[in-house]
Amino acid sequence: MTWTPVEVGERLVKWRKLRRLTQKDVAILAGISHNTVFLYESGRSAMSMERFLWVLEALEVTPERFFGTPPPKEKKVVMRNVKERLDALDDGTADRLRAKADRLRRKK
């Protein structure tokens, strides 16, 4: 089955809300801009495979679960905020994501 950018975007929104994350949270965790998350969710832009995997990692979902039908409605254990998730990362990943988020904030 082929998925359109709009269909992928609708799934992104459902998974993001299931995880109780904002677009900004996903952007920081995936290392991309907030505007890019908006474009993906609205179906106005298609993602590269690399970026798609970054976003799925931020949402803590595998490609198989992401494309499963329909998205689950079960209650998920969600960390309280992005800072806790960043602190839980290892090998400098959190520092890299924080630095990228700082650069994105400075661009505005």
Image (cartoon, rainbow, N blue to C red):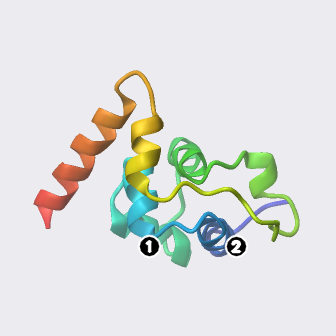
Dividing the picture into quadrants, the one containing residue 100 is top left
* Marks 1/2: CA–CA distance: 14 Å
- Residue 24 drawn at (x, y percent): 38, 65
The amino acid beneath tag 2 is Glu
Mark nearer the N terminus (1 vs 2)? 2
As displayed, is residue 20 above or below residue 57? below
Q: Nearer the viewer, mark 1 or mark 2?
A: 1
Dividing the picture into quadrants, the one containing residue 23 is bottom left
Helix, strand or loop status at disc 2: helix
The residue under label 2 is: 7
Helix, strand or loop status at disc 1: helix
Q: Residue at x 36, y 36 (%)?
A: 94
Dividing the picture into quadrants, the one containing residue 62 is top right
The amino acid beneath tag 1 is Phe
Q: Residue at x 66, y 75 (%)?
A: 10
Q: Is residue 25 left or right of residue 100?
A: right
As displayed, is residue 60 above or below residue 42? above
Q: Residue at x 28, y 34 (%)?
A: 95
- Residue 77 drawn at (x, y percent): 68, 56
The residue under label 1 is: 38
- The one of 50 and 85 positioned closer to us in this rendering: 85
Q: How many marks?
A: 2
